[in-house]
Image (cartoon, rainbow, N blue to C red):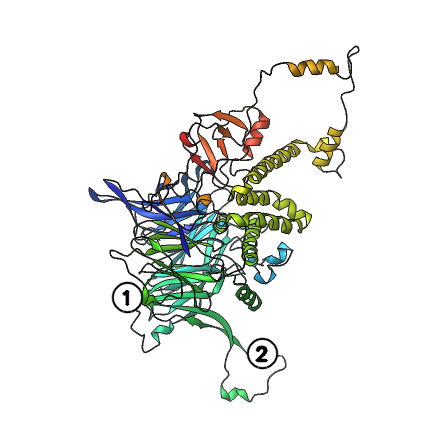
Amino acid sequence: MEVAYVCEWEKRPKSNHCPSIPLVCAWSCRNLVAFTTDLKNEEDEKDVSHMIHILDTEHPWDVYSINSGHSEIISSLEWDQSGSRLLSADGDGQIKCWAMADHLVNSWETIVGSAVDGDPIIALSWLHNGVKLALHVEMSGSTNFGEKFSRVKFSPSLTLFGGKPMEGWLAVTVSGLVTVSLLKPSGALLTASESLCRLRGRVALADIAFTGGGNIVVAATDGSSSSPVQFYKVCVSVVNEKCRIDTELLPSLFMRCTTDPVRRDKYPVVTHLKFLTRENSEQVLLCASSQTGSIVECWSLRKEGLPVNNIFQHRSPVVGEKQPMILKWRILSATNDLDRVSAVALPKLPISISNTDLKVASDTKFCPGLGLALAFHDGSIQIVHRLSLHTMGVFYGSSSGTSQRSGDEPAIKRQRAAGPIIHFTALHFSWTSLALAGVDNHGKLHMIRVSPSMGQMLDMNTLLRHLLFLLEYCMVTGYDWWDVLLHVQPGMVHNLVEKLHEEYMRQNQALQQVLSTRIVAVKASLCKLSSATAARACDFHAKLLLIAISSTLKSLLRPHVLNTPDKSPGDRLTEICAKNTDTARDEGHPQDPDEALIDECCLLPSQLLVPSMDWLPVNDGVICKLQGKQPLRLQFSKPYSLPLNSNSQVEVFSRIAGAQRMDNLRCLHMGVSPTEESKACTRCGCVTMLRSPNKTNAMKQWEQRWIKNCLCGGLWRRIPHTQS
């Protein structure tokens, strides 16, 4: 593991961003990171604004800061499955839903909200939409995407008429209430609250998971390690246009450390309670801590036979009678005594954990999705196996900066730097588990590379296969692949592009059509990483534009014009263009121009200068600057890097002054100093004007296609005039 970049706040004379307590962070599947700080006025200590900051990982300095309007500390942030909406909840029971204004990642607004007045929210989650994939490492060598990434049967938390999943969210409060808010198609909000159990008690920590049958499971604890961790099944339904919540108590557990005579009173407080994945309610992670240390336990819910009393054991069994079964929590693994844990990050990659998949992953040293991250108060991070809790990799931080050392180095040899120790208070994995975003106790954002093999030596072919496997996963799911590009070196680009094309051509025709645009966008992103393939990146961007034009022209053909229903619009258009309909010619005019006339025309001076078209959008992101091992030091709102030392080079992330500005979407030249507001793609850097200069319906239809996304599928961000 190694730091890719660190982004910090500028020091101001009167107001400063400081980390909120607790500090929360969330990472979406579109590679948008949201985190919180408190903006304090040094002249008035009571003047505190609870801020939410949203940025895309390719342009971390371009942060959009929202004064959330929450009256208390923000306790939860949760992205939806599409990565385009964000939930925030606070210590006063307020929940707000945020969405992009004008489909721009650096412009957000609250669209709806709910509240449980005065009851702090401690757990928050969107309802499940029923979409679940399983990633099979065993089938990574298969030629069929359907075998590599299989669809798992999973029911939504709530469905509308026709089986469409209903959108909404669920929250747990400190007083033991579960509250559900449902978004109706009309825009109205249905809200209901119910107690988790008949005897309500204080809930210090809670987490939410989902079952394949459409139910919801809530884990809750009062914060004491000697108290049981309770589990509840929650069923949500709509009856007579009203939301109804039913709860049921499930088997509970006691942490093993409380039954160990040596550790009974050593770790009195439960500090972290997490389901290992949101789609698996049968595995839970618990962390108990003291002022100086922590211990982590992993538990699993299993079916076991109910023992029969000796009196009944000699009774002759009835034919077909089965032994009664019960559900019981059993400990899977536990760590030794650890330093005090400050944050936990769980993997989001839905890797299959069957015995065969785990064996293949071990043999090929494929680690994404198998490890969870533990951050400690000494500034270090350990990645441990999600089942065995064995250490897979270690990252050591320091007060003066960041450093990485081998995981084999004994802890006693660490050189502690003088001064306050920087440690992570919030930690989140990317959606392919190849990167970690951490926010430290000074409010700085750290982007950390996580090796696919956790630092184990790999031959080049195996490494390429791992990266190719994850790129294919991003293509199939539609997730952003920026975190995969963190591990691509310039020498890998050509082989990755060729292998990706080979795998794509092996798919069936229908799947190729679905992925036709995505694979071109992935190839363009890869080719930008190497100067040797930059020309190919230009070709791929031009191909994206041509594909879009072709799709638009086909959509303009009206159904009644197509008299042959067996032919597609494209075939029909080709047939029409092939016919020569210009048969009427005026008498006295030759069919072909005289060759002498053509020669004379060629000698005439050209009065029209057609400027060259720059198909390659300007690359102003960080990904191309992260090829070296030296981390970048950035500052929020500053499009350039800060020097790490006297010898380090300053990187500038802006467009060359005096260069001709290009609207890549409309193929228009905007001049050297355009006056129109513009937006740029977070992925490829494609620039276009925010407001349309066109009035024709055909051009408006073209522009409407790209309101939400760029040609490559990336999101839009507003850019200032000087960068357009």
Identify which amino acid the numbered label 1 is placed on.
Answer: Thr
Q: Is residue 710 above or below residue 127?
A: above
Q: Earlier in the sequence, mark 1 or mark 2?
A: 1
Nearest the eye: 416 or 551: 416
Q: Residue 415 in the image: state x and y as whole percent.
A: 30, 61
Q: CA distance from mark 1 to mark 2?
A: 50 Å
**Disc 1, SS:** loop
Q: Residue 108 in the image: state x and y as whole percent.
A: 41, 40
> How many labels sit on residues?
2
Residue at image coords 55%, 48%? 493
Nearest the eye: 373 or 396: 396
In the rendered structure, the answer to whether residue 544 lies left or right of residue 427 reads right
- The residue to which callout 1 is attached is 292
Residue at image coords 76%, 35%? 564
**What numbered label is drawn on residue 136?**
none
Q: Quadrant of residue 329?
A: bottom left
Q: Residue 655 in the image: state x and y as whole percent.
A: 43, 33
In the rendered structure, the answer to whether residue 410 lies left or right of residue 509 reads left
**Dot 1 surroundings within 10 Å: few (below 14), some, or many (20 or more)?**
few
In the rendered structure, the answer to whether residue 333 lies left or right of residue 411 reads right
Q: What quarter of the picture does the N terminus occupy?
A: bottom left
Extreme-top residue of the structure: 588
- The residue to which callout 2 is attached is 322
Q: What quarter of the picture does the C terminus occupy?
A: top left
Whether residue 160 is visible, yes or no, is no
**Disc 2, SS:** loop
Q: Please tell me whether mark 1 or mark 2 is closer to you in this view.
A: 1
Identify which amino acid the numbered label 2 is placed on.
Answer: Lys
Q: Quadrant of residue 464?
A: bottom right
Nearest the eye: 442 or 244: 442
